[in-house]
Amino acid sequence: MKNYAAVHFRLPDDQMVWAGKYALEHRHLPISEAIGEFLKLEDPMGYEFYLERKVSPKEVVRIRNQSRPIGWRYSPNAKRTTPCYCPACGSIGEPNSAKARKEWEAINEPQPMSIPKAKQIIASSCDTNALQDAISAFGDKRRKSDPSFLLRLLEMEDELLEYTTLEVIGTHAHPKTRELLENYESDEEEIQELIRELLTKRGWKSN
């Protein structure tokens, strides 16, 4: 169970504070003027004061229990509205923020392409962008299937697609994988180095 307390303290009229509405520009002025502005506001919700020093024990005049929290939770105008948890608006540490972010991502973030859909695109498409998206669906997860269905991508004359395809071929723990990697020819040093790395990871010595 959480306990809340309210601390009452008294400051001199000329004490300088930062005052203004939440998330808006604050002004540096004497607290007496800031309180005067606050009392004249039609909508004081979200008005706040910042004191740039500690409150001394002599300035504390009362401490009392607070039966429940008062004020606002997410922002002054948040009542009856749902906070936005997109990457731009969401804040770490807010109540239930982790759960809310996951729910937001499930609704708004693009879902990963399924492997059957990716294989369908790989088998039929000539669009290198679509093929790159399809090959990316495999990620770096190890698989036991024959990677021969990926060979047509190596004929597309696209350097990024070639590199990514070889990486995915290397994740397949299948006898055909070694044959494909060892027999693949390229004049690019970067591709040759990648093939050596993939063979080494599998414990196969490159020729």
Image: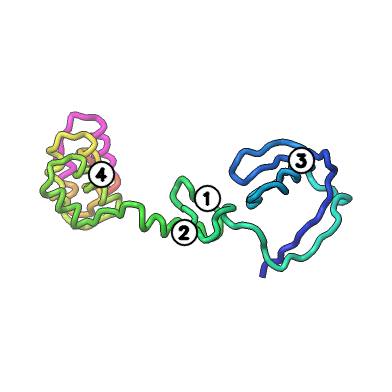
- Amino acid at pointer 4: Glu
Q: Is residue 8 left or right of residue 86?
A: right
Tell me the residue that label 1 is attached to: 91
Name the dominant secondary structure of the magenta segment.
helix
Q: Is residue 93 left or right of residue 183?
A: right
**Alpha carbon of mark 1 to alpha carbon of mark 4: how far?**
36 Å
Magenta-drawn stretch contains 22: no
**Alpha carbon of mark 1 to alpha carbon of mark 2: how far?**
11 Å
**Alpha carbon of mark 3 to alpha carbon of mark 4: how far?**
67 Å
Q: Nearer the viewer, residue 47 or 127?
A: 47
SS type, badge 4:
helix
Contact between marks 1 and 4 (CB within 8 A): the answer is: no
SS type, badge 2:
helix
Tell me the residue that label 4 is attached to: 167
* Furthest-bottom residue in this view: 1
Contact between marks 3 and 4 (CB within 8 A): the answer is: no
- Numbered mark located on residue 33 in the image: 3
Contact between marks 4 and 2 (CB within 8 A): the answer is: no
